Amino acid sequence: MDGLTAFINDAPLLLIAGLLFLAQCLMREVGGWIRRRVSADAGESAEEVSDKGYLLSGVLGLLALLIAFTFGLAVDRYEGRRHLVTEEANAIGTAEMRVQLLPPPDGARLADMLRDYARTRAAYGLADTTDRPSLARSSAVQRSALQTAALSSLAPVSTTALAAFVGASINAVLDIGVEREAMNDARVPLTILRALVLYALLTAAMLGYGLTGARARHRATTVILFTLLSLAILLILDLDRPQGGTIRIDQTPMTQLVAGFPPKGQTAP
């Protein structure tokens, strides 16, 4: 992970938004300075003013399109993470019920392992970004142990329909756990975020260049525009931080599953 990636993923969101806002204001001033350097004539014809308006409208429209595209990527990832929480809770609950069909003590042992795994997964979902890696490693260890125990328990009934019935549910638990962790690590590509920020800064420079003749009149307008653009990019970054921003993935399905288990050390009636 390079420094820019770490900064985007870990820095406070308000800090990123503030720096982006200040950078846009600076680029607006740079654009105005360039305009004053290349054109000493302050007068403009009506046709030139109209052409400038079309150009600025086109640039802002392209920026809006890029923001909408990036926002769509972030929302898709958010919805995918939210959906996987429900899927994993359902998969673990189904497997925990099915393994109890196995003869004792294998059924009870696998059920206890699944309940412990569900508790780890619930903690994983509620953890912040600093605690998640250790819980992901614990989950991987539990999945490996669960796979080994399932193969051992299903060997005596491997030729029966029960083996396929139970084995499929355990396999679903193993698969969706890996899928959920991969989805949590999937972010909007850094190249797209770089392009979005660069385009926002270039747009600010073009606004400064195009509005230099009436810069005092439009300064408040550009400040509002830069604030809105910074907030839009802030929202994209917030959506792209699972449990690390203000927009959190609802963990209710997993917590309700764990709450429905018997206390640790007791077997289900």
Image (cartoon, grey):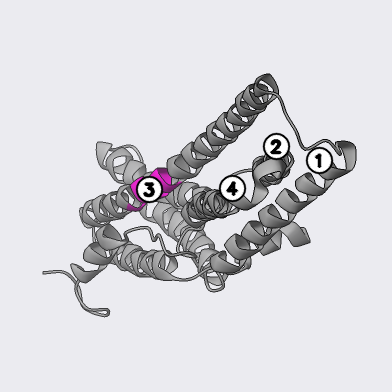
Report whether 185 appears left or right of 255.
Answer: right
Q: Which residue is mark 1?
A: 35
Report whether 1 appears left or right of 18.
Answer: right
Lower sequence index among marks 4 and 3:
3
Residue shown at 55%/64% (left/top)?
13
* Residue furthest right in the image: 37
| 148 vs 245, nearest the viewer | 245
Q: Which residue is mark 2?
A: 210
Lower sequence index among marks 3 and 1:
1
Q: Residues within 10 Å of mark 3 (few under 14, many from 20)?
A: some
Q: Which residue is mark 4?
A: 218
Residue stretch in magenta: 78-85
Are the residues flagged by discs 1 and 2 in contact, CB closer than 8 Å? yes
From mark 4 to mark 2, how far is it between C-alphas? 11 Å
From mark 2 to mark 3, how far is it between C-alphas? 48 Å
Residue shown at 70%/24% (left/top)?
45
Identity of the amino acid at label 4?
Answer: His
Are the residues flagged by discs 4 and 2 in contact, CB closer than 8 Å? no
Q: Which residue is mark 3?
A: 84
From mark 1 to mark 2, how far is it between C-alphas? 8 Å
Q: Position of residue 211 (x, y in %)?
A: 67, 41
Lower sequence index among marks 2 and 3:
3
Q: Position of residue 258 (x, y in %)?
A: 26, 67
Identity of the amino acid at label 3?
Answer: Leu
* Residue furthest front in the image: 43
Secondary structure of residue under mark 3: helix
Lower sequence index among marks 4 and 2:
2
Residue 56, disc: none
Q: Main secondary structure of the magenta part?
A: helix
Q: Residues within 10 Å of mark 4 (few under 14, many from 20)?
A: some
